[in-house]
Amino acid sequence: MSISENFLHSDDIHPIDMVETLAEHQAWEFDRVGEDQIAMAVEGQWRTYSLTLAWSPADETLRLICTFEMEPPEARLPEFHRLLNRINDLVWTGSFTYWHEQRLMVWRYGLLLTGGQCAGPEQVSRMVSSAVQCAERFYPAFQLVAWSDQPAEEALQVAIAEAYGRA
């Protein structure tokens, strides 16, 4: 049975229930933190990403954050922030921010579900995959700026260059 079929005959689907079913289907490690929140670990090519999805009934938004540790040296922070700004100009499905105190890179996205709308399993799956894809795509650029002398523009070329063939 597909994920969509699990939810076809239900009129009142809690968004986090749908996320939990998706996590089970994908065999992702997860923890249902509460009625309105779930935390997951999703393995990427570069690292394992921590994802949290939370339902906010007050503003009817399904919020997603995808985090990974990043500790750029203080001297590289200005260039690191330049890179963040350049990256955020390129993406439309969310945005990156750096939480300096926690030493975390954060991808944020909010899906508005006003007026009683329900998110479909395909939407939730796309939210998660988009977060991981963006983290994977730009991770090398973050590393280059943090740990080398490369400027943001040069490091960004690594992330936006298309690879052809296989090594």
Image: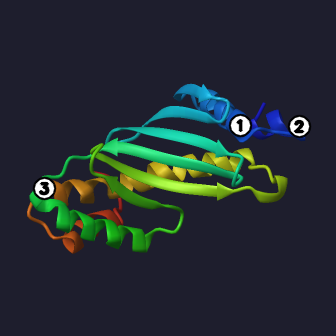
Q: Which mark is residue 39?
A: none
Percent position of residue 120, x then y:
75, 48
Percent position of residue 47, x then y:
33, 39
- Farthest front residue in view: 58
Q: For marks 1 and 3, give the one nearer the viewer.
A: 3
Percent position of residue 114, x then y:
77, 58
Specify the amino acid type for callout 2. Answer: Ser
Q: Which mark is residue 74?
A: 3
Where disc 2 sits, the SS reads loop
Percent position of residue 123, x then y:
68, 51
Taking depth in this image into account, of 118 and 9 the one nearest to the observer is 118
Specify the amino acid type for callout 3. Answer: Glu
Where disc 3 sits, the SS reads helix
Residue drawn 68% across and 37% down?
Answer: 16
Callout 1–callout 2 Cβ contact below 8 Å: no
Asked where in the image residue 50 lies, by quadrant, the reply is top left
Asked where in the image residue 156 lies, by quadrant, the reply is bottom left
**Residue ID for mark 2:** 10
Alpha-carbon span between mark 1 and mark 2? 11 Å
Residue drawn 30% across and 53% down?
Answer: 139
